[in-house]
Amino acid sequence: MKNTNDFVALDVETANANAHSICSVGIAKFSNGKLIDQYYQLINPEESFRSINISIHGIRPRDVQSKPTFLEMKNDMIKFIDGLPLIAHNAAFDMGALKADYIRYNLSYDMIQYMCSATLSRALVKTVPNHKLSTMANYYQIELNHHHALSDAMASGAILINLMADLQENDLFEFLRRVQYPNLGELGGRGFKKATKKI
């Protein structure tokens, strides 16, 4: 049964500079601060791979040759998300990639509401040199295999849990209200932005 502290964390990797070239998706599901399920899928982006992208995430064309396309796996992804709020680190990138593939395949947007752990980190953690995923994972001593989509997703979710703990807040939506980010972003719609008026 869902509760207000259930959420998923997501990360995608891309084959090249095109936003719609998603070649892997990782999703981690959390309930009351605990990881309860995970989903990982290599994706055939139907695009060429750039060497720089391969050097970042290690995924090669041969790894995805027999894998489903985004169009073929999208419903499984949405079923796993199950309407839960989503968090990603630098969510504009991940949501932009999803949006680009929805446009590419002429799909209607699913209702995906999201937060950004990088944005929330910048709002609350002032003692780090930057708010990259690797920096925040190190700050909170979170295990990270950087640029593996599932590991990145799990780290983003763990960062959110730690940020909430820093404020001694157990309710996700009360936490977002307290940090002035009460409105979730929406895939294909509004971004995840600070409230224009102090709450």
Image (spheres, helix red, strand yellow):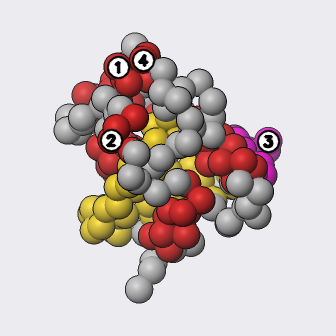
User: Which element is circle 3 on?
Assistant: loop
In the displayed structure, 110 sits above or below 159; it is: below
The residue nearer to you, when weighing 118 against 124, is 118
Circle 4/circle 3 CB separation < 8 Å: no
Mark 2 and mark 4: span between their CA atoms?
14 Å
* Nearer the camera: disc 1 or disc 2: 2
The residue nearer to you, when weighing 198 against 104, is 104
Residue 95 lies in quadrant:
top right
* Nearer the camera: disc 2 or disc 3: 2
Q: Residue shown at 57%/49% (left/top)?
A: 115
Q: Earlier in the sequence, mark 4 or mark 3?
A: 4
User: Which element is circle 2 on?
Assistant: helix
Residue type at mark 1 is Ser
From the image, tell me which residue sits under label 3: 196
**Residue 191 at x, y percent in the picture:** 72, 44
* Nearer the camera: disc 3 or disc 1: 1
From the image, tell me which residue sits under label 2: 63
Residue 96 falls within the magenta-colored stretch: no
Mark 2 and mark 3: span between their CA atoms?
45 Å
Q: Is residue 169 left or right of residue 158?
A: right
The residue nearer to you, when weighing 132 against 173, is 132
**Magenta residues, as a range?**
188-199
Q: Earlier in the sequence, mark 2 or mark 3?
A: 2
Residue type at mark 2 is Asp
Q: Earlier in the sequence, mark 2 or mark 4?
A: 4
**Residue 36 at x, y percent in the picture:** 27, 68
Residue type at mark 3 is Thr
Residue 100 lies in quadrant:
top right
User: Which element is circle 4 on?
Assistant: helix
From the image, tell me which residue sits under label 4: 51
